[in-house]
């Protein structure tokens, strides 16, 4: 098999090295070894220098201060916790009758702290119920 790369000069130690074409396309093949690569990083700030706070789970964004949720999301989560505590965990979807993982869905869309404003739905029915007012009006 024919080699398709070329000979390059290391930016740190000036030694010549063979750089395969795939490596050139990936990162430019600037260094002959990991030690030269790490040498090039010395004195440069890290990628997250200056960011404060902690990272939210499953996201790349930072929250300033601490890792507790603030504002509407905190209220939303605490309301769902309150509903599960008051109504318990249902085992059956009130729309399609599916048995399994059931979620509490808000009927009015106003998220009142009233138990009669909630309905037990499976995740697929909950998705449909929440997405359009037209579909919601069919069910009520």
Image: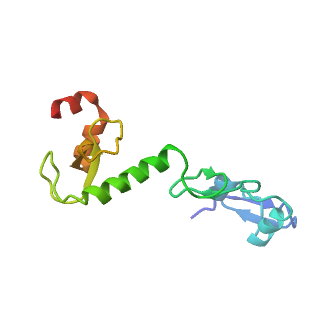
Instruction: Give the camera-side residue of 12 and 129.
Output: 129
Looking at the image, residue 84 sits to the left or right of residue 67; the answer is left
Q: Which of the image's four quarters has the C terminus? A: top left
Furthest-front residue in view?
A: 114
Image height of 30 relative to 108, above or below: below
**Residue 59 location, x and y as percent?**
54, 53
What sort of colour scheme is used for the picture? rainbow
Image height of 13 relative to 71, above or below: below
**Residue 124 location, x and y as percent?**
24, 47
**Residue 61 location, x and y as percent?**
60, 50
Furthest-top residue in view?
A: 134
Looking at the image, residue 92 sits to the left or right of residue 46; the answer is left
**Residue at the spot x=42%, y=47% of the render?**
76
Q: Quadrant of residue 114?
A: top left
Q: Quadrant of residue 6?
A: bottom right
**Residue 58 location, x and y as percent?**
50, 56
Instruction: Give the camera-side residue of 71 and 67.
Output: 71
Image height of 125 relative to 110, above or below: below
Q: Quadrant of residue 20?
A: bottom right
**Residue at the spot x=23%, y=44% of the render?**
116
Furthest-bottom residue in view?
A: 35
Q: How many marks?
A: 0
Looking at the image, residue 21 sits to the left or right of residue 37; the answer is left
Instruction: Give the camera-side residue of 133 and 16.
Output: 133
Instruction: Give the camera-side residue of 97 and 105.
Output: 105
**Residue at the spot x=81%, y=58% of the render?**
45
Q: Which of the image's four quarters has the N terminus? A: bottom right
């Amino acid at each position: 098999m024919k080699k398709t790369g070329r000979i390059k000069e290391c930016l740190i130690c000036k030694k010549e090295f063979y750089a395969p074409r795939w490596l050139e396309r990936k990162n430019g093949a600037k260094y002959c070894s990991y030690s030269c690569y790490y040498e090039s990083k010395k004195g440069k700030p890290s990628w997250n220098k200056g960011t404060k706070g902690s990272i939210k789970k499953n996201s790349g964004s930072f929250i300033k201060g601490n890792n507790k949720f603030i504002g509407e999301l905190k209220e939303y989560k605490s309301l769902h916790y309150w509903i599960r505590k008051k109504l318990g965990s249902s085992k059956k979807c009130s729309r399609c009758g599916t048995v399994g993982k059931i979620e509490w869905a808000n009927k009015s869309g106003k998220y009142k702290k009233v138990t009669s404003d909630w309905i037990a739905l499976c995740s697929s029915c909950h998705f449909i119920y929440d997405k359009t007012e037209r579909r919601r009006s069919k069910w009520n």
